[in-house]
Image (cartoon, helix red, strand yellow):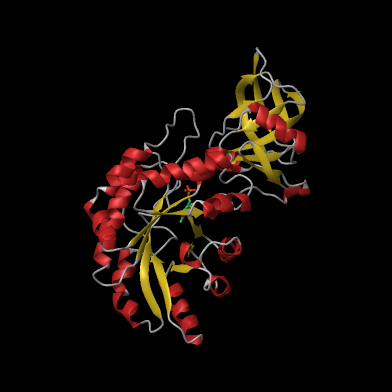
Amino acid sequence: MLNNSTIAGCLEAMEPPLYIYDGDSIAQRIARVQKAFPKFSLLYSVKANPYDKILNIMREAGVGIDAASGNEVLLAKGLGFRSEDIYYSSPGKTRRDILSAMEAGTLIADSIHELDMLNAIAEEQNRALSVGMRLNLPNPHILKSKKEIMGGHASKFGIDPQTYEKNRERFHEYKHLRIQGIHVYFGSQILEEEILFNNFNTIATYALEMAKDLPLTFVNFGGGFGIPYAEEERDLALESVAERIHSLPAIQELLSRGVRCNLELGRYFVGDCGLFVAEVVDKKESFGETYVILNAGMNSFFRPMFTHDYHAIRQMTVRNETEQITVVGNLCTPIDEYYKGITLPAVEIGDILAFENAGAYGYSMSLLDFISHDRPSQIMLIGGEQVEFH
Ligand SMILES: Cc1ncc(COP(=O)(O)O)c(C=O)c1O
């Protein structure tokens, strides 16, 4: 647990701004998902946090990789993940992306153009290539989820059913491709059990249809499991949704045919296992408002400003009186503002503030080079010990 004395210990070793990750909590979270989804293979979505110490925990726990760029594939391969456990799915892959990643993992084509390109590259190299394709299936239920929807309606991701039908013949004409798997990803940060259940049912049912046509060996179900950011949000009922998903006839049929069912998660594994820690370096009044200025901003922890999710602030020093403050970064732009007019126990210059739920989409989603400050440090704690920082 990242309690205040752990944070104080880290601050003796490193100055803020810094990210602190709790490796034990990450390992426990993985174990919980493995227990709830015993028939599924797990993949970690590197984009959530590509820190190598996190990837090492994933590899040691037997979790594979969901990569979204050639470089993420190479990062995972370099850290010892097996090629059969690495899947690469993203829109707009270039020939260079494909060439860099094709030996190290399974490529998932995002369009007909990508399938054509993969076939042409395999032909040039006089080889057969096993690939998957990403589909964008209709899903009216997903629209009830509030956030980060990526499929189920018109979007840049995947191949829609009309395009699939139009190209059905073509899939068998590729001389150098074996289309062996599908990937569907409807959206992120889903906290509604019913929507998740429906997603899995939709994908499994469609996969069985496709299996009449193509020799499917894997289905990547996506995931999109959310974590509570706002106070009113509640933890996902993981075990009960997992039980319902396992009991779906379409899932059982896929499993009985030996189809590998992959569940890919990013923030659910690492989101609440990390804190972003910054120091208050100034405090001022301006036209009657109180500004608290941190030694970090959108260059170090951009996510709250970008997504407007509330990352709760934990104070190392908690005073009795409260005050209304606007929390901002130290960058020369007015958009560098975390929270306007929030009420917190009084804050003073020199205080340390820790933002919760910063383990996913923290460091790597920030504008790290903007205004040329030093980059934040990162510390991984395992067994309460600092195993590494840089
Ligand atoms: C295809 C795909 N898979 C997995 C993820 C990971 O999402 P999350 O971190 O919410 O689990 C994303 C996020 O954008 C994604 O686009």
| Front-most of residues 257 and 278 | 257
- Quadrant of residue 156 within the rendered picture: bottom left
Tell how many labels: 0
Seen in the picture, residue 187 relative to 128 is either above or below; the reply is: above
Seen in the picture, residue 33 relative to 282 is either above or below; the reply is: below
- Quadrant of residue 213 within the rendered picture: bottom left
Q: Quadrant of the N terminus?
A: top right
Residue located at (56% from left, 40% from top): 24
Residue 172 visible within the image: yes
Seen in the picture, residue 340 relative to 97 is either above or below; the reply is: above
Seen in the picture, residue 131 relative to 358 is either above or below; the reply is: below
Residue 297 visible within the image: no
Q: Position of residue 50 (x, y in %)?
A: 59, 53
Q: Position of residue 267 (x, y in %)?
A: 50, 45
| Front-most of residues 251 and 81 | 81
Residue located at (51% from left, 85% from top): 125
Residue located at (56% from left, 37% from top): 357
Tell me: 154 left or right of 380: left
Q: Position of residue 245 (x, y in %)?
A: 29, 47
Farthest top residue?
320
| Front-most of residues 274 and 82 | 82
Residue located at (60% from left, 32% from top): 2
Q: Position of residue 174 (x, y in %)?
A: 37, 81
- Quadrant of residue 78 within the rendered picture: bottom right
